[in-house]
Image (cartoon, rainbow, N blue to C red):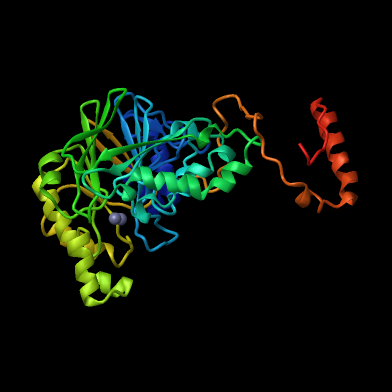
Amino acid sequence: MRFRIALSFSLGALAVLALLALTGNGGLIPFVGAEDGEEADWSPTKPYPRQNVYYPGTEELKPDEMRVTACGTGMPMPRLKQAAASFLIELGNGDKFIFAMGTGCMERLYALGIPLDFIDKVFLTHLHMDHMGDLPAFYIYGPQNNRSVPLRVWGPGGGGTRPEWGTKAAMDHMLKTWAWMTGTLAGTIDTRSFVLEVTEYDWSKVNGVVYEENGVVIRSIPAIHMEQSASFILEWNGMKLAFSGDTLPNKWWIEHTKGVDFSIHECIFTPDLAMEKWGFSKAEALNAVTTVHANPSFFGKVMAMTRPKHAVAYHFQNDADTLPIVMDAVKALYDGPVDYAQDFMVWNITKDGVRTRMAVPNREMYPTPSLREKKVDKSNPYQTPDSVLAGWPEELNGITNEIYREFNEEHGTNFKFQLKK
Ligand SMILES: [Zn+2]
Ligand SMILES: [Zn+2]
């Protein structure tokens, strides 16, 4: 049918008329292959029967379905096109998990328009900036963006690594870093989302249970990426999703991710690309892509050894000139399905297979509403010191009182302007 549409354009008006006569339905061309598999009509006024992209917030997640959205697929080298690592995992039971929160991912996550109370679970594979750099901002922006629930963070620790390098210590220091901001908001805004619940999991355990709730189990296996790095395997509804974080090929991954439904694994540049694009020296380039990260050949070999139903390669600058080089190296070793991730690539995963599309995010998103009634704790409010308030110009009292008068009249309220609480 699509061929007939193309043909009609090429043969001109006469052919169009002939085609309309053939279809006999007033010019509507039946289109087989709409999303539900049923025949639908193309119309000049109705919505198109098929969308090849995903508009966030417009599709119901089916009870047996998993949706993964790439909110960061890139590198520690910041770029507009690709944030650093982050994947949002949404399950048909209503659970949502954020795997990694690299720098730049937060705007992409927000662009999906999901109420923050639904995305309260963050899982960190390791504490590199390109895997957790946006966590402080995500945490601290809770009140202004209508989060009303605590933020829950799972991250690596233990396993013989120095306690001061662990996730608990990192989060403790994060809270201390933002002490002025959290302290000065007391009594002004609903700050219930400033509660941070941190769970440290032992990164050295093989298949240790990191999380188990509501029919979802997340296990970790060690990664080879300095120390205190892990990979996750999420199991739900008879499906398995594996997320490498950063790692060299390792026997734990190869043993425990065989045949998984969805396998997200790092795939960095080749040594030559590392030199050309990052300006690395020969030694730096070789070292980075063979002793710290998995180059495309490593990725291809690992996929050939594990053969997931669907694989995703991430953690490289995915451009018109780099992609063919990366793909060639992978394809030399692996012939299974691989998506080379870009930000906003989205996957719908069921037992029947995987559908890959690009999401069309809202570039002008506003905060989603609070899902609970706002509560401001007035028991110990912060007060700006008199010495600072002394700088207020009395000449502005007139227009400020006018703003209050108009507001109260419109809303039937009785607020009074006062800088001193
Ligand atoms: Zn790393
Ligand atoms: Zn990384």
Q: Is residue 22 left or right of residue 382?
A: left
Asked if one can make out residue 264 in the rendered structure from this viewpoint, the answer is no
Above or below residue 318? Residue 377 is: above
Place of residue 104 in the rendered image (x, y in percent of width and height, measured from the top left): 44, 54
Q: How many marks?
A: 0
User: Along the line of sight, which residue is nearer the eye, 357 or 154?
Assistant: 154
Above or below residue 51? Residue 351 is: above
User: Along the line of sight, which residue is nearer the eye, 77 or 365?
Assistant: 77
- Ligand 1 picture quarter: bottom left
Place of residue 149 in the rendered image (x, y in percent of width and height, measured from the top left): 49, 30
At x 18% / y 62%, what residue is drawn?
Answer: 291
Q: Can you say which quadrant of the picture contains the N terminus?
A: top left
Above or below residue 26? Residue 53 is: below
User: Along the line of sight, which residue is nearer the eye, 68 or 207?
Assistant: 207
Above or below residue 326? Residue 35 is: above
Q: Is residue 104 left or right of residue 368?
A: left
At x 47% / y 32%, what residue is drawn?
Answer: 150
Place of residue 143 in the rendered image (x, y in percent of width and height, measured from the top left): 57, 38
Asked if one can make out residue 184 in the rendered structure from this viewpoint, the answer is yes
At x 27% / y 49%, what residue is drawn?
Answer: 245
Residue at the farthest bottom position: 281
Place of residue 122 in the rendered image (x, y in percent of width and height, measured from the top left): 38, 39
User: Along the line of sight, which residue is nearer the eye, 185 or 313?
Assistant: 185
Q: Is residue 377 left or right of residue 159?
A: right
Q: Can you say which quadrant of the picture contains the C terminus?
A: top right
Please identify the quarter of the rendering in which residue 65 is found.
top left
Q: Is residue 364 left or right of residue 6?
A: right
